[in-house]
Amino acid sequence: MKVVIVIAGPTAVGKTELCVRLAQELNTEIVSADSRQFYREISIGTAKPTPEEMQQVRHHFIDSHSIQDYFSVGDFERECLQTLEEIFSRKDVVILTGGSGLFLKTITDGMDEMPEVDLSIREELMQRFAREGITPLVEELKRLDPAYFEYVDRNNTQRIVRALEVCLTTGKPYSSFRTGQKAKRPFEVIKICLTRDREVLYDRINRRVNLMMEAGLIEEVQSVSHYRDHYALKTVGYQEVFEYSDGKYDYGKMVEKIQQNSRRYAKRQLTWFRHQGDFQWFEASDYEGIKAYVLSKIAY
């Protein structure tokens, strides 16, 4: 039996450290399903595994693509399934991890079939985004599809536009096409979601942001400023630094906004995973409990 162990959870909960430890014990490899860690040009703001962690355990889909590449969730599904097949030729167990719920779900369950969209609507939405920014589009999505609005990454232009173009083309909520019918996969799936006490998680987020600033987040953002409109940079940590560089607010306010927006993002991530209903939840600090649960599910 081939098994994919999904380790999900919000930003800064401690997925990377736990996955490296578990992968070492299981003598296996880690596949990242984090939609920002694919890009080799951005590392500090995406909290990639450290070089030491990468040496301890082989990782896949870290620095695998350039920010110049268009890499959709559909592209990830295709490439990741090929990677899993290759890993399974030498391993019985693989760890799949990340906080990007849609990217995890497309591997375990497959993608829903979506209707053809009116390309003129897509073009109009992108023009609106260029003129007005993401906020008006997010507000329109809230009105047209409040269910999807609740857990979508509201800084992800690609997902916001994709949902809106379906809503506007069909007159139906984007979420209504998300049927949840699972694709057949040639492996079993164990789903675990990590959590922590809210105050503990928020403190970890705040401290992580401070460490990112010390590590040179501003310099990293400036180095990719010519890709500013790329959807990979329409995310927490990068948007706030761009606005700081534009003189919109001072350094202290920038750090505060990154921390605040990261906490809000973590809350949305938790909401998304809870809506899935098929995760086994663990405190991130309960490594022994998680290991025991995994071992009980794996047939050796």
Image (cartoon, grey):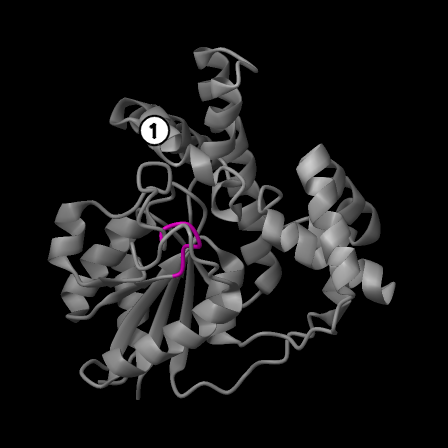
Classed neighbour count for the residue bearing mark 1: other residues with Cα under 10 Å, few (<14), some (14–19), many (≥20)? many
Q: Is residue 120 left or right of residue 294?
A: right
Q: Residue at x 40, y 28 (%)?
A: 203
The residues colored magenta run 33-37
Corner quadrant of residue 62 = bottom left
Q: Is residue 136 left or right of residue 266?
A: right
Q: In this view, does 224 lie above or below 271?
A: above
**Residue 246, visible in the rendered structure:** yes
Residue 121's spot in the image, x, y percent?
78, 57
* Image quadrant where one finds the C terminus: bottom left
Q: Is residue 105 above or below residue 212?
A: below
* Image quadrant where one finds the N terminus: bottom left
Mark 1 element type? helix
What type of secondary structure mainly makes up the magenta span?
A: loop
Q: Which residue is drawn at 44% across and 54% down?
A: 35
Question: Is residue 190 rendered magenta in the image?
Answer: no
Q: Mark 1 points at which residue?
A: 217
Q: Residue at x 38, y 44 (%)?
A: 13
Residue 296's spot in the image, x, y percent?
30, 75
